[in-house]
Image: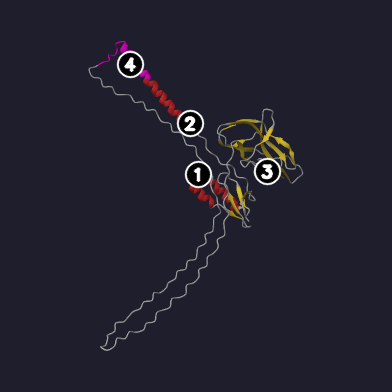
Amino acid sequence: MSNDKFRQAENQFFLLKGQLETRRITREQFDAALKELMVQDTDGRYWTIGGDTGIWYVHDGKNWVKAQPPGTSALESYHTPPATQSRTSCFIILVGAGLAAIVLVVAVLGLWFASSQGLVKIGAPTVTTTPTVIVVPTIATQPTPVVVAPTLAPPSPTLPQPTTTLSVPTATRVLPTIALPTATRVLPTIALPTAPAIPTATVARLTPVPASPTTPPIPPGLYVTAMGMDQPQPAHGQIINFTVSFLNTSAGDVSVKWKVYIYRADNPAKPNTESALVAASFPPGKSDHVPVPLNFKIGATGNDCDYFFARVDTLDNNNKPTDLTASDGKVFEKGFSVCK
């Protein structure tokens, strides 16, 4: 089966997700469109993309299982735009209100000084004072968008129920008008038509469609959602740059020291290389495409391809590394190969 179906589904998924985050479509429209992206491969298996995780799932006949379709790359997590513009607007409004208050205080002090020096006489039989109204702007707090986990289901074939409409003629007995002779009144015998037999309707049995996976709650903590590479298929002698996307599900900022370790697939016990140490603080929510301070390069080894995988670790005060996990609780690993 061609992989174009999976690639088209991924492209349409990114387009829908961008429209949802910019509020051009509603969550209900997004969920309805997401159901149309389900793909069925040549083996008859259903594939779908998780609305929140962006991960491919395949139905094994009983449950939805995380899997990767052939010829596709892992989907990146989605970007949630920071609230910098909202904070800047609030700051400008507060500064404007403060300047207005300062001008009012200076005007009152000037009037009092002029009155005390006799420059201005204040007083009249009837003084009508117009109150000065200071409008303090109300700063609206931008609501935090809430991502609702969608319920995905492969499209259920709708089989029409057979409907049999029977037309049963109504037997009508019509008595003709007969002139009665003086002696005897004879009524004619009228044969009633026989109603046709009612056919038996056959009901087709519907094939059940497997239920869509549900997204389990994620405990508070710092997770890795994706790792990107600037070279889709790197070659020997080519420099590779990485980016990491994080997810902080805690209520506050999480400050850690982290680095990336790269292992050869045939020697997973010892890192082949590692990046520089990075100290960073992650706010609640997603932090996408964080650059990794590492220019990874592998020269010719005589092999057609060399296989590697990368992990993201945090380090404690004793520089002891701990592997970060994905949101499903498994250690995050990014596999890749370097070929001729």
The residue drawn where x is 41% and y is 26% is: 96
Q: Taking the image as drawn, is residue 297 in sight?
A: no
Q: Which residue is mark 2?
A: 87
Helix, strand or loop at label 3? It is strand
Specify which label sits upstream in the sequence, 2 or 3: 2
Give 299 or 66, whichever is nearer the viewer. Answer: 66
Query: Do callouts 4 and 1 mark residues in contact (Cβ within 8 Å)?
Result: no
Q: Which residue is mark 4?
A: 111
Q: Which mark is residue 335?
A: 3
Q: CA distance from mark 1 to mark 3?
A: 30 Å
Give 201 or 300, whichever is nearer the viewer. Answer: 201
Question: Amino acid type of disc 2?
Answer: Arg
- Dot 1 crowding, Cα within 10 Å, few <14, some 14–19, many 20+: some
The residue drawn where x is 46% and y is 28% is: 91
Helix, strand or loop at label 1? It is helix
Question: Amino acid type of disc 3?
Answer: Gly
Q: Is residue 188 left or right of residue 83?
A: left
Residue extent of the magenta highlight = 105-123
Give the residue at the far right of this rendering: 302
Question: Amino acid type of disc 4?
Answer: Leu
Q: Which residue is mark 1?
A: 20
Give 168 or 301, whichever is nearer the viewer. Answer: 168
Q: Taking the image as drawn, is residue 258 in sight?
A: yes
Specify which label sits upstream in the sequence, 1 or 3: 1
Residue 65 picture location, percent across and down: 63, 49
Q: CA distance from mark 4 to mark 1?
A: 57 Å
Image quarter (top left, top right, bottom left or bottom right) of the C terminus:
top right
Specify which label sits upstream in the sequence, 4 or 1: 1
Residue 190 picture location, percent across and down: 37, 82
